[in-house]
Every structure is written in structure tokens, then in C-alpha cells.
Image (tube, rainbow, N blue to C red):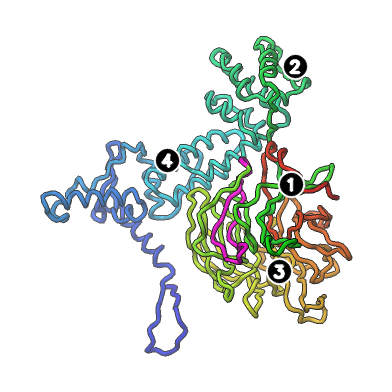
């Protein structure tokens, strides 16, 4: 039998704690083997006339539903004539009737096997029944497994069905991902039966969505025509309402209408062109909003490069900008400013929104507050504050959870604390702490594992790397970097982690350094599968001139490119955004200029609706 021992004291008289690593699994296996013997069972579940013997303790431990049922039965029996529960607990209090919940015998027996073995096989035949039962019986882990299965099954053919199913059973993350899939694949989805069978109210809601990805507004009209023709006798009367409420007629072109006439020769019988003309005449100069989204780089907060009036102006900013790269030029566009000025904070995208958390304010106070920017309404709103104020920390998102890691809530010493914010419950939850106190580390996520890289504390820098597995809530150490550093930036791409920049004191004669004896560190790449680091040779380092004049503010993944944002010295001039193509391994300049009078700003990628993006004011003329 395998044991772990806490403590290394060799004194035989000293107490030592032994832990059997397989104890829990062996105990569960033994309980599973005896549960089919009735004399080991102390309860019964009744479904559609069949009695299934159960062990109440196991059901109560696994399901909050059963715990409440058994507690209620105990409290009732205790209150009858003031007698003790043991004398009143009869057969009725041990039987739980699940028939009203419409859970089948087969479904419950599958779930019962899961409770004892922790294993379950999900497929398209049983997923609906299992998820429904898990939701009713408050089996959180099983419901999460069902949600993960559904996420892997989303296709154009079943997307609308999964969306409806997730809505009914409050699977918020599945609903969000199916919504995003639907918006990105609208044209394909309209080819399948689920779309043609949509009820009128859901169809109307779908076709009014601003963020649908369409080639032209003709895709919307085409989907309306096909939906009506699927049941023309009963639906033709809805055609006028659909065109008036959903179709953005100003975005239609003559060629699009002509193409639809050729596709549907009987379209003249529907009177569609007359309906379109009537709507155009009734709009009275109003402009139809474009559909779709634009993927942009967003920055928020940071420090002023130049303070013009020290008496009235703080160096900490609350400005927010997005960067647009277009064929006609690159622009920084103004977004609404944050609700609070922040510096040394962190930002992350989760669920289609931008979250800005922590940092320091204009009075140099360390912040625990946070706020969310929703691009659909172009507005910032506050979120629940963290349990621990912090700056110089990591902020990463995995599905619907945002993780705040490390940093410092005190000028003297970094923190090991970690907490997670759920974007649907709006609550922060404490998590196991890191092994090392560290601030200004780099952070990246691969396969639901969070990597905390390098960083340090006063007088000490680290090359060590810690990994937090969000599935098991455990920390482990992995291969350290080749070169210790702090204030680096990291991003994951194709299973590898790219770490750029960071600084450390000059110690090596071969290192490039400036007058302050500070070395700007080179790029390293971590292979998560092999648990190994590779240094990019200096002669192949084309990010920037590798000296202490450069500073990296943020690193983001944008398609097949990694964008590095900061003050990047390029042999006598500075650039703001440099892009590295992970396929060709080539660098290119994206933008020379950054947002006006701003430095030290964190960034992330964000999808902004086109109609919102179109209204954003320019912060400066186009830059090359």
C-alpha cells in the first residue's frame, strides 16, 4: 500500500502523519461492491413502480437534493409527538419517490453507477436525460461533465437545439458558446432543419441580432424566405412582420435582390420587393446598423508618459483605446474611459467582455476593485471586488472563470494568494496558494493549466515555474526557465508558451546592458508536452534591439500571430506593436505609434460589434 509521509524527522519518537493515497478510491470501490446486497442498504428510491435499494449516506454526500430530502424526513420524524427520530423513522422516511421528476429508471441507474465509480459514458442518446437529472438532483460535477460533452458536440446542424437545451437547464457557459458559434456560422446553420423549425419568436430574436456574421443582408432575407417556404401555408402571413422587424433594408443591394429572384422564381408572388420599398419609405432618414463584429486590440489604464500639470494631473490613467489595422491606415480609437484610474493592474477577456482588475489608483492605493467593459453596449460597469487587493499580479481566463494570481497587496512582500471570479455567479472564490511569493511574473494558460513564470520579490528574482491544474486545484513545479527575470510577458500558442522580455541585473559579460546595469532578457519558448525550455539565440532575436531601452507592456495572440506591445527600440527609433508569425517565424511591424501619452498599459483582444466600432472617435490621424 502506498503512503505519503509528512515530515522528515528521523527521530522514532516524533509523531509522523501517514496518508494512504488510494484510500478514497478503495473505499468507494468496496462500497460499490456491497451496494447490490440489500442488507447493506438503508434506503430506497422509487421510480415508476420500481424500488431501487440505495445507501442514503452515499446519495446525501453526492447530491444536495438527497441531503435536503433526508434532512427534511429526519426533522419531520423528530417533531412528531416529541419522540426521538430513531423511534419514528419508518419505511416511509427511507423511500424517495423520483417519479414526479420524470427521471427514468435507466437514467438513475447510470447516475448511481457514476456516484460509486466516478465514471460515466455520455452519448447523443443519453445526454439529455443525464443532464436533466443532474440538474434536478443538484449533481454539480456531473452537470459540468455533461456541459463539457455538449461543448464538444456543437455543429451547425445541432447548434440551435443545444442552445435551447442549455437555456432550459441554466448551462450558462454552453449557452454563451453556442450563441457565439451561431453568430459566427449563421449562413450554414440556416441550411438545417433546426433553423427551419424555429418558432416565430425565436426566429425574430435571432434575425435581429447585431453580431450575426453575414456576407450581405441578403443572407438574412434568404433565411426568411426559406423559413416561410418550409411551411408556406401557415407562415406566409408572418412575412411582412419579419421584413419590417428583422431586415435591414438599407443594406440590401440590387444585385442581392436579383440573385434571390433567380434562386426563387416565385418570389414575386410574395410581394417582397413592395414590402422592402414600403419600409425604405417609412424609415425617415434612420440608418440601419451594420451586422457582425470587428476583432481589435484593446488597452485600458496605465501611466502618462508626460504630465503637463503636476498640481492638477496624476500619472495614473483611466483611458481606454482600441487599435484598428485597416488597408487605409492604422488607428487608435477612443473607448469610454474606465470608471477608475488604474496602473499596475491586469486585464483579460472572458465571455466576450473585457475585465480590468486591481492595480493602484491616483493616490497610490492598492485596489481590490474591478470593472467590466461590455462591447455590445459600449459601457463599463463595476464587478465584485477581490478578496485581496493586489498589483503586479496575473489575470487569466479559463472558460467562465477569471483567475487572479499572486502580485502584492503590500509594498514590502508579494503574495501567494489566488482567487477565481465566475462571470455568471459574480463571486470571487479563494483557491490554493502558490508555493513561492512572487510579483511581476508572466502568466499563460495551456489545457486548463495556469503557468506562473519567473517574477520575484525584493532582492531576489526567480527562474522557477509553477503550474496550477484547474481540474484538480493543485500546484506543481515544472522545468525552470533558462534565465531568471521579472516583468516579462507570456502567451500560449499551439501548446507552447512564448515568454518575451523581462529584466534582471547584469551579471554575465555576454549580456547587453545599459548604464543602469539592467539586462533586457531574451525570448524563451516552453514546450508543455516535453517540459523543456528553448532559448532563442541572440542573433535570431528580431523582436527589437535587445537593450534596456525596450519595455514590453503586453503580449497577445491574434490568429497565427503573436503581437508584442510596448516601447520596442529598433535601432534609433521606437515601435509600439511588433507581430511574430508562429508559422513562418518572421517578424513584422504592425504600428509605430501607440495610444496618446500612455505607457505601461495592459492589452487583450476583443470582438466589438461593427455598429459600435463604426461610432468610435479617432484619437489621432492614421499612422503607418
Q: Which badge, 2 or 3, is on the more N-terminal residue?
A: 2
Residue at image point 60% right, 58% down:
396
Q: Residues within 10 Å of mark 2 (few under 14, many from 20)?
A: few
Q: Is residue 3 magenta?
A: no
Q: Residue tagged by mark 3? A: 533
Residue at image point 41% right, 55% down:
117
Which label was assigned to residue 262? Answer: 2
Instruction: Please provide percent x and percent y for residue 355.
Output: 60, 53
Which label was assigned to residue 333? Answer: 1
Which label was assigned to residue 132? Answer: 4
Q: Quadrant of the N terminus?
A: bottom left
Give the magenta part as a residue range. Answer: 352-377
Instruction: Please provide percent x and percent y for residue 524.
Output: 74, 67
Q: Nearer the viewer, residue 370 or 148?
A: 370
- 2 vs 1, front mark: 1
Using the numbered discs, state the Cα–Cα distance from disc 2 to disc 3 in whole angstroms: 60 Å
Q: Is residue 374 visible?
A: yes
Using the numbered discs, state the Cα–Cα distance from disc 2 to disc 1 in whole angstroms: 42 Å
Q: Is residue 479 left or right of residue 254?
A: left
Amino acid at each position: 500500500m502506498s503512503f505519503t509521509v509528512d515530515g522528515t524527522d528521523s527521530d522514532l519518537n516524533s509523531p509522523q502523519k501517514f496518508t494512504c493515497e488510494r484510500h478514497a478510491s478503495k473505499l468507494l470501490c468496496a462500497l460499490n461492491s456491497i451496494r447490490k446486497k440489500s442488507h447493506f442498504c438503508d434506503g430506497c428510491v422509487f421510480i415508476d413502480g420500481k424500488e431501487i435499494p440505495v445507501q442514503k449516506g452515499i446519495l446525501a454526500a453526492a447530491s444536495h437534493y438527497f441531503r435536503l430530502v433526508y434532512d427534511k424526513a429526519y426533522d419531520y420524524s423528530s417533531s412528531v409527538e416529541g419522540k426521538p427520530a430513531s423511534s419514528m423513522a419508518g419505511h416511509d422516511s427511507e423511500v424517495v419517490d423520483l417519479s414526479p421528476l420524470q427521471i427514468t429508471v435507466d437514467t438513475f441507474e447510470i447516475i448511481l453507477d457514476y456516484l460509486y465509480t466516478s465514471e460515466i459514458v455520455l452519448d447523443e442518446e443519453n445526454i439529455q436525460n443525464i443532464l436533466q437529472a443532474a440538474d434536478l438532483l443538484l449533481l454539480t460535477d456531473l452537470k459540468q461533465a455533461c456541459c463539457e460533452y455538449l461543448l464538444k458536440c456543437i455543429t451547425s446542424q445541432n447548434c440551435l437545439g443545444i442552445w435551447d437545451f442549455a437555456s432550459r437547464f441554466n448551462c450558462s457557459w454552453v449557452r454563451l458558446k453556442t450563441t457565439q458559434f451561431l453568430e459566427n456560422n449563421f449562413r450554414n446553420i440556416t441550411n438545417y432543419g433546426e433553423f427551419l423549425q424555429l418558432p416565430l419568436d425565436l426566429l425574430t430574436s435571432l434575425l435581429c441580432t447585431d453580431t450575426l456574421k453575414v456576407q450581405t443582408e441578403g443572407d438574412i432575407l434568404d433565411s426568411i424566405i426559406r423559413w416561410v417556404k418550409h411551411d408556406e401555408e401557415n407562415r406566409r402571413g408572418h412575412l411582412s412582420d419579419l421584413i419590417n422587424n428583422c431586415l435591414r433594408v438599407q443594406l440590401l443591394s440590387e444585385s442581392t435582390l436579383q440573385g434571390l429572384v433567380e434562386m426563387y422564381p416565385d418570389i414575386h408572388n410574395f410581394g417582397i420587393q413592395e414590402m422592402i420599398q414600403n419600409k425604405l419609405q417609412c424609415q425617415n432618414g434612420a440608418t440601419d446598423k451594420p451586422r457582425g463584429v470587428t476583432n481589435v486590440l484593446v488597452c485600458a489604464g496605465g501611466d502618462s508618459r508626460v504630465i503637463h500639470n503636476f498640481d492638477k494631473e496624476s500619472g495614473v490613467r483611466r483611458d481606454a483605446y482600441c487599435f484598428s489595422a485597416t488597408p487605409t491606415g492604422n488607428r487608435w480609437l477612443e473607448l469610454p474611459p474606465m470608471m477608475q484610474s488604474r496602473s499596475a493592474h491586469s486585464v483579460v477577456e472572458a465571455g466576450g467582455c473585457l475585465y480590468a482588475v486591481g492595480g493602484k489608483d491616483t493616490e497610490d492605493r492598492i485596489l481590490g476593485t474591478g470593472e467590466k467593459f461590455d462591447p455590445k453596449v459600449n459601457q463599463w460597469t463595476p464587478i465584485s471586488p477581490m478578496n485581496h487587493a493586489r498589483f503586479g499580479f496575473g489575470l487569466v481566463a479559463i472558460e467562465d472563470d477569471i483567475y487572479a494570481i499572486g502580485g502584492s497587496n503590500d509594498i514590502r512582500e508579494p503574495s501567494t494568494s489566488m482567487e477565481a471570479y465566475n462571470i455568471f455567479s459574480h463571486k470571487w472564490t479563494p483557491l490554493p496558494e502558490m508555493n513561492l511569493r512572487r510579483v511581476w511574473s508572466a502568466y499563460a494558460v495551456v489545457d486548463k493549466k495556469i503557468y506562473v513564470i519567473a517574477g520575484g520579490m525584493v532582492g531576489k528574482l526567480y527562474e522557477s515555474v509553477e503550474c496550477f491544474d484547474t481540474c484538480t486545484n493543485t500546484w506543481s513545479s515544472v522545468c525552470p526557465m533558462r534565465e531568471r527575470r521579472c516583468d516579462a510577458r507570456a502567451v500560449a500558442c499551439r501548446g507552447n508558451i512564448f515568454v518575451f522580455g523581462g529584466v534582471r541585473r547584469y551579471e554575465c559579460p555576454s549580456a547587453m546592458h545599459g548604464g543602469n546595469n539592467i539586462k533586457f532578457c531574451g525570448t524563451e519558448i516552453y514546450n508543455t508536452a516535453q517540459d523543456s525550455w528553448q532559448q532563442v539565440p541572440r542573433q535570431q532575436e528580431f523582436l527589437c534591439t535587445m537593450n534596456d531601452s525596450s519595455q514590453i507592456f503586453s503580449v497577445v495572440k491574434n490568429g497565427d500571430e503573436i503581437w508584442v506591445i510596448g516601447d520596442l527600440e529598433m535601432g534609433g527609433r521606437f515601435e509600439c506593436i511588433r507581430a511574430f508569425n508562429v508559422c513562418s517565424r518572421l517578424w513584422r511591424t504592425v504600428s509605430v505609434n501607440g495610444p496618446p501619452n500612455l505607457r505601461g498599459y495592459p492589452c487583450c483582444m476583443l470582438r466589438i460589434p461593427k455598429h459600435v466600432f463604426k461610432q468610435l472617435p479617432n484619437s489621432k490621424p492614421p499612422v503607418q
